[in-house]
Image (cartoon, grey):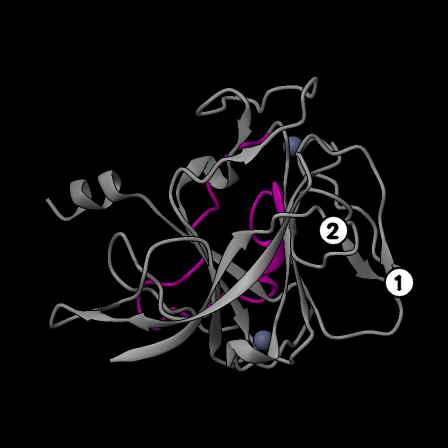
Amino acid sequence: MRVHYIEVEPKQEQAAASRITVGGSPIVSLGQDWPECGLCKAPMVFFFQLDIDKSSDLQLKPGSHLLVFMCPIHNDIPSRLMEYGDRTLPEKYWDGDFGHYALILNKPSKTEVKLDQANPLQLISFKYRELEEVIDWDGRTERGSAGFKLGGVPLWEGEAEFPTCCCGAEMVFVCQVPPGFGFPKLKGAAEQAECLMPGNYYLFMGLSVYLFACKDQCTPRSLYPVAQDIIEDQILSG
Ligand SMILES: [Zn+2]
Ligand SMILES: [Zn+2]
């Protein structure tokens, strides 16, 4: 089986106007502020932003904008909020964790603003490359390609886990951040707390991250991160 997906790769020239970036200035809807950590109130680190490109075939409003933030101090994995049975997320699951990360998916808006605030990461602008994804099937699970990507099929280090939004809608697999993906820090910026490798910041301690969004986009925060770790899953499965 082949599935259309979009690889996210660095662009040669640094376009300040880019809407697909690591670091830089988050593009938010008017009235949204730079997120603060729910535990320590520190301004979060802005990791990356992506546009939901029409060419991605995702069942989300084209032109929607994804933003990913995490606390610089509370560098931790996301808590598991999914039920083991039907995998329906609890009411207001976006407030259900410790508040150490913020995931936002705004519908297309004419009233966007760029937030400018100190952020420890280098600005890297990205571009999309459309590809056909070759899907592996091991008799139980479909597995897509590795890499930083928009849409397609998750690679999954362990078992496939598809959450359902508390509103009842299915969730769409939006984005994959591969394991150990380093977000380069600016020269002179502080190192990430408990960083894996100096010079880089890591999202959710460098686990594989699969971001899901409510198909109905019932709120801008109706997103859920499934983070997986190869070693942990191998231990769990004995
Ligand atoms: Zn914090
Ligand atoms: Zn929903």
Where is residue 141? Give x, y as percent.
21, 69
Q: Position of residue 199 (x, y in %)?
A: 55, 23
Specify whether 155 is left or right of 42: left
Residue type at the position of mark 2: Ala
Question: To which residue does mark 1 refer?
Answer: 30
Which numbered disc covers residue 1?
none
Q: Give above or below for 218 relative to 176.
A: below
Q: Is residue 146 above or below residue 106?
A: above
How far apart are the two marked residues, 1 and 2, measured between alpha carbons? 23 Å
Q: Nearer the viewer, residue 101 or 175?
A: 175
SS category of the residue bearing label 1: loop
- Quarter of the image where the C terminus is located: top left
Q: What residue lies at 48% left-to-right and 46% top-to-bottom? A: 78
For the N terminus, the quadrant is bottom left
Quarter of the image for residue 5 reads bottom left
**Magenta residues?**
74-101
